[in-house]
Amino acid sequence: MILLSGNEAIAQGAWEAGATIGVAYPGTPSTETMEQFAKKEGVYAEWCTNEKVAVEVGLGASAAGARVLSTMKHVGVNVAADPLFTAAYTGVNGGYVILAADDPGMHSSQNEQDSHYYAAAAHIPMLDPADSAEALIFTKAAFELSERFDVPFMIRSTVRLSHTKAPVECGERLAYTLKPYEKDAAKWVMMPAFAKPRRKVQLKRIESLEAWVEECNYNRVIEGAGKIGVVCAGACYQHVAEALPEASILKLGVSWPLPKKKIVDFAQSVDELYVIEEGSEYLTNAVKACGVTVCAPANALPADGEVSPRIIREAFGFKLPAFEPVRTDVPARPPALCPGCPHRIVFKELSRLRAIVTGDIGCYTLGALAPLSAMDTCVDMGASVSMAHGMELALAGVDHKPVVAVIGDSTFGHSGLSSLVSTVYNQGTGTVCILDNRTTAMTGHQGNPFNGVTLQNRLSRELDLEAVVRALGVADVRVIDPNDLDAVRSNLKDATTNDELSVLIFRSPCILLEKVHAEPFRVDASCTGCGVCVSIGCPAISRDEDTGIAGIDPIMCVGCGQCSQYCRFDAIVCG
Ligand SMILES: Cc1ncc(C[n+]2csc(CCOP(=O)(O)OP(=O)(O)O)c2C)c(N)n1
């Protein structure tokens, strides 16, 4: 037995099943799954530009006969939804397993979604492991099931399963040989003439899946001594088991299709039936649709966020042991761009310009927070460029502040590129800042097309960002050092006042990629306490509460010198 996180266990399960290909786009809490899979022997793994591409590459590899793993976070499933829905028509050749990692409570996401709905809507069977051991067993089995039922299988995880380590029994790798590829237009060419009969195939498959799920031992009843019964799935089971030790639990390991008969039988075996799930009504509504009465606990469970044993016990009206009082006299530590982050000056200058900034998703989203407060919107990957164009359309002819889109290099490759093509095509004239820190920093420094680093460090090709943007027809393309205040200020001013579409590429590596930092800066006696240096939001700089005099923490300071460029009194000096 070894300790593995849910993500590591899924990677191990895929490897044991003989999967040879892994394709993904990073996203918390799924990222380590593909990183771990990539380290295993006899596999090929790659980061794709986005989740749609990953699922299409995965489906191609499956069609050619390989067993394939794709991983993504819940919002990635939105991006991949187009191929996913039709993959449920074509089916597979080699087994194809897709991890959807949900983030109830939004620890690191822009929304909370329940991927169960995708499984139900796309008719893709979904397995819901409750711990690492099940994550391995279910993933391994999902490859065989995918081939047996001729459909991709989804594994659903949530942040607690993905990131919790639990004991796991590892096994041998199956000697899987590539299945022969056979040309079969009726299966793989989804035009209406072929898709209509495939839809019938899909409906027949759903019938077989519904029969299988009633027998499948992944759905288990854990008998309790009490009279209440709870239906739950996935990691939520752990909270239910701890909070309600007397309850009987129908623990669902397959959450689509649901074992309707088993649910009805279970409901009949208890006096009161409850459903406990996180941030969603998928399971509650599905259980009600089986024709059974679902009771509401004495106090409602929260409609959003995660549950915990305490939350469940509170809902069921149990008396709870008092908490140790939480200390409140500790300094707040809101998230901030790192000391030396090359994104900082750009946001400070956008703030000074009072620009309307359509933002995007990455480390740089922190530019929205005080004291920079420089971002107006952040919705989904790539939206910065398209929303900026939309704002310009609405504000045409009106006297307005400059509109500036800000996007990271990985996000630009993910979906900003197609937004920019649309802006160019429709003669947009705004300003787009690409913050090229040479990595996908937010999710842990993965490679992307614009730094040319691949997942398994295979030889790659680094795409020339300026050449790509120029090739789209943007004439005003500039590459600027974001650590140079004068250059950032003058180029932003120029780009936001000219009449053409400008793309400013701010290029400097993420400070965490720099292995050696320069000597720290310090504040000398000429500091007047004006506070401008503090307004750039560097965690290394603080101010004396009484005098306003600035101070720099020499441990945190990386010697980037950004703050010294803002000091009009030359009070911030090196060494
Ligand atoms: C559809 C989707 N996939 C994945 C993610 C997870 N994610 C958030 S930001 C990001 C990439 C950020 O990289 P980059 O744009 O280079 O900015 P940086 O963090 O380096 O500043 C990723 C993969 C997401 N939020 N949405």
Image: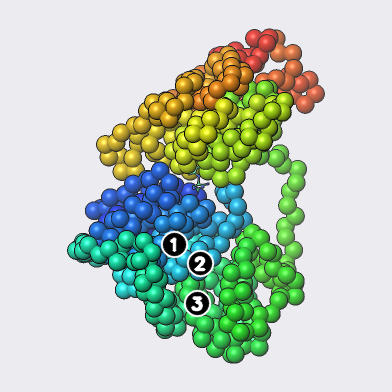
Residue under the point 45% across and 69% down: 123
**Is 548 situated left or right of 44 in this image?**
right
Separation (CA) of disc 1 from disc 3: 19 Å
The residue sitting at 41% across, 57% down in the picture is 83
Residue 431 % position (x, y): 57, 27
Q: Earlier in the sequence, mark 2 or mark 1?
A: 1
Q: Which residue is mark 2?
A: 121
User: Can residue 226 be seen by looking at this rendering?
Assistant: no
Answer whether residue 115 is visible to the viewer in this image: yes
Residue 239: x and y in percent read 59, 68
Task: Identify the image quadrant of the N terminus.
Answer: bottom left
The outermost residue toward the right is 546
Q: Amino acid at mark 3?
A: Leu
Which residue of the protein is positioned furthest toward the front in this rendering? 193
Query: In this picture, is 469 found above or below 151?
Result: above
**Residue for badge 1:** 85
Contact, mark 2 vs mark 1 (Cβ under 8 Å) = yes
Q: Earlier in the sequence, mark 2 or mark 3?
A: 2
Q: Secondary structure at mark 1?
A: helix
The picture places residue 142, in percent across and down from the top left corner, at 36, 68
Above or below, 391 against 177 in this view is above
- Three-letter amino acid code at the position of disc 1: Phe
Quarter-wise, where is residue 375 in the image? top right
Tell me the quarter of the picture where residue 461 sits.
top left
- Packing grade of label 1 (10 A; few <14, some 14-19, many >=20) is some
Residue found at x 31% / y 62%: 188
